[in-house]
Image (cartoon, coloured by chain):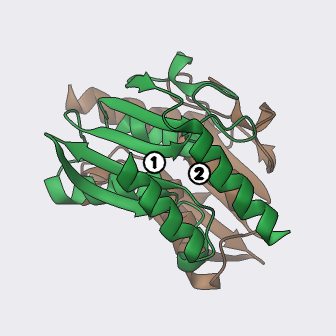
Chain colours: A brown, B green
Amino acid sequence: MEAAFAEAEAAAARGEVPIGAVVAMDGRVLSRAGNRTRELNDPTAHAEILAIREACALLASERLPQADLYVTLEPCPMCAAAISFSRIRRLYFGAADEKGGAVVSGGRYFHQPTCHHAPEIYAGISETKSADMLRTFFKERR
Amino acid sequence: MEAAFAEAEAAAARGEVPIGAVVAMDGRVLSRAGNRTRELNDPTAHAEILAIREACALLASERLPQADLYVTLEPCPMCAAAISFSRIRRLYFGAADEKGGAVVSGGRYFHQPTCHHAPEIYAGISETKSADMLRTFFKERR
């Protein structure tokens, strides 16, 4: 989770929304990423998507059933579905995102009958740090 | 929509689930793609995601407010959220996808309070053709 926070900080330094994600397996980091939607002009370049794509490329597989994802904020529906499709084993995330989340907020994707794989979910990891980081970022931009 | 079906057919020929998508603006095709999840070992490489990413790269923008998306099947939650984030103006799709869709099925993402932009939606375009194509593909693989 510390590496995910480092990625979130690096994203903020690039002017991106400060969210970071790490895919880990067998005790080692497979991939790590922060948001790059602005830099890449890519609305799908959320931290989770970039980290999942990189881990899949590394393993030459579209599935990561032995891997866990650490992310500093509750994933949105796009990322929640990508987590499901990639068969991630465990999801650890920081603060809940009432405005845009899809795990404990909104459509709660992993509870939908249209969701065919749900990871084990561990919510609220360092949630104060996660929420503070976002709050500070948006306050400074106003 | 015809170009989207051609992409779906090309995807089937590559052994991918036959779904195709096209992003159009001002009467011309900006980008077109079929599913490539297997080929690319990328669970996010749905037709819609690939077409949106390519159109954004072309316009050097993470938003496509003047563009419309044509897709042969109801988008999943990942693609529905990407459509929302990219501010696509209109969404035209073929058959509904009760098992995995997120527009008229499942969490109906565009109706969630966590969805901040919904396109105009035109459903059921050539839906018989769309459903038949998928049925044939999965029957042949069994």
Q: Locate residue B33: give its quadrant.
A: bottom left
Where's the N terminus of chain B, which quadrant? top left
- A79 or B18, which lies in front? B18
Q: Which mark is residue A19?
A: 1
Residue at image position (63%, 66%) is: A23
Looking at the image, residue B106 lies above or below residue B60: above
Residue at image position (41%, 53%) is: B4
- A13 or A40, which lies in front? A40
Query: Callout 1: residue from which chain?
Result: A
Residue at image position (60%, 63%) is: B43
Q: Which mark is residue B56?
A: none
Question: Earlier along the polypeptide chain: callout 1 or callout 2?
Answer: 1
Residue B41 visible in the picture: no
Give amino acid for label 2.
Val
Q: Is residue A37 left or right of residue B11?
A: left
Q: Position of residue A110 (x, y in %)?
A: 76, 38
Looking at the image, residue B108 lies above or below residue A16: above
Looking at the image, residue B54 lies above or below residue A128: below
Residue A111 visible in the picture: yes
Q: Residues at badges 1 and 2 in contact (C-beta under 8 Å)? A: yes
Q: Is residue A72 left or right of residue B53?
A: right
Q: Is residue A6 left or right of residue A24?
A: left
Q: For marks 1 and 2, give the CA distance.
A: 7 Å
Residue at image position (61%, 69%) is: B16
Q: Locate residue B142: give its quadrant.
A: bottom right
Query: Callout 2: residue from which chain?
Result: A
Local packing at callout 2 (Cα closer than 10 Å; few below 14, some 14-19, many 20+) is many
Q: Position of residue A27 (x, y in %)?
A: 75, 76
- A53 or A94, which lies in front? A53
Residue for badge 2: A71
Element marked by disc 1: loop
